[in-house]
Amino acid sequence: MGWKISGTLDENIKKCVLMVLPHTANSDFFIGLFTRGIMGMEMNFVAKKELFVFPLNYYFKSVGGAALDRSGGKNLVDTIVDIFETREIFRLAIAPEGTRKKVEQLKTGFYYIAQKASVPIITVAFDYGKKEVRLGKPFTPTGNYEADLKILVKFFKGVKGKFPERQIKL
């Protein structure tokens, strides 16, 4: 398809949050699957448990999916942190935009999941302009979201989503 991968993901990092931007198209999921396959490393995502029914449950689990059970009154961050605690390897890909539509600000869950699970954040850019998936270096959250976000978003400067008009202005 003419895409390339630049940067690396240290295979010794067994748990992390992959901050994937921009997320403007359904095809981003497949770019992620191809990247996962080419790199030969387990990378994961979460989806509501209702999607993990026969026969889709076999497919979603085979491509790194984890069923998200939000029953029991837990918030989303705590529910995902519980998944980190039960897995030996869990590299969670999250699109902080939260949707493929245009948004004005990023959702904060990716950050607080990483902080609470004590795992690094690794920036991942899907740049349709250059046909490149770019992986950044591990970043450890300091607890100062505003300051940390300023550092993290620098990685995405100049990156174009499939539909640039839908991507967040960083």
Image (spheres, helix red, strand yellow):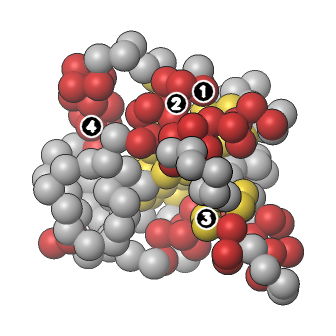
Residue at numbered disc 2: 114
Image quadrant for the N terminus? bottom right
Q: Of the residues shown, which amino acid type is indicated by label 4? A: Val
Q: Of the residues shown, which amino acid type is indicated by label 2? A: Ala
- Residue 25 figure quarter: bottom left
Cβ–Cβ below 8 Å for labels 2 and 3? Answer: no
Cβ–Cβ below 8 Å for labels 3 and 4? Answer: no
What secondary structure is marked by label 1? helix
Cβ–Cβ below 8 Å for labels 4 and 1? Answer: no
Q: Of the residues shown, which amino acid type is indicated by label 3? A: Ala
Cβ–Cβ below 8 Å for labels 4 and 2? Answer: no
Label of residue 153 in the image: 4
Residue 55, given in percent of the width and then of the height, sits at: 84, 86
Q: Please name whichever residue, 6 or 87, is drawn nearer the observer in this view of the structure.
A: 87
Residue at numbered disc 3: 47
Q: Residue at x 80, y 37 (%)?
A: 86
Label located before the other in sequence (3 or 1):
3
- Residue 79 figure quarter: top right
- Give the foreground label among 4 and 2: 2
Q: Of the residues shown, which amino acid type is indicated by label 1? A: Ala
| Left/right of residue 80 with respect to residue 59 in the rendered view | left
In whole angstroms, how far apart are the C-alphas of marks 1 and 2? 5 Å
- Give the foreground label among 4 and 1: 1
Cβ–Cβ below 8 Å for labels 3 and 1? Answer: no
In whole angstroms, how far apart are the C-alphas of marks 4 and 1? 21 Å
Residue at numbered disc 1: 117
Number of other residues with Cα within 10 Å of mark 4, as a class: few under 14, some 14 to 19, many 20 or more: few
What secondary structure is marked by label 3? strand
In whole angstroms, how far apart are the C-alphas of marks 3 and 4? 25 Å
Label located before the other in sequence (2 or 3):
3
- Residue 130 figure quarter: bottom left
In whole angstroms, how far apart are the C-alphas of marks 3 and 1? 18 Å
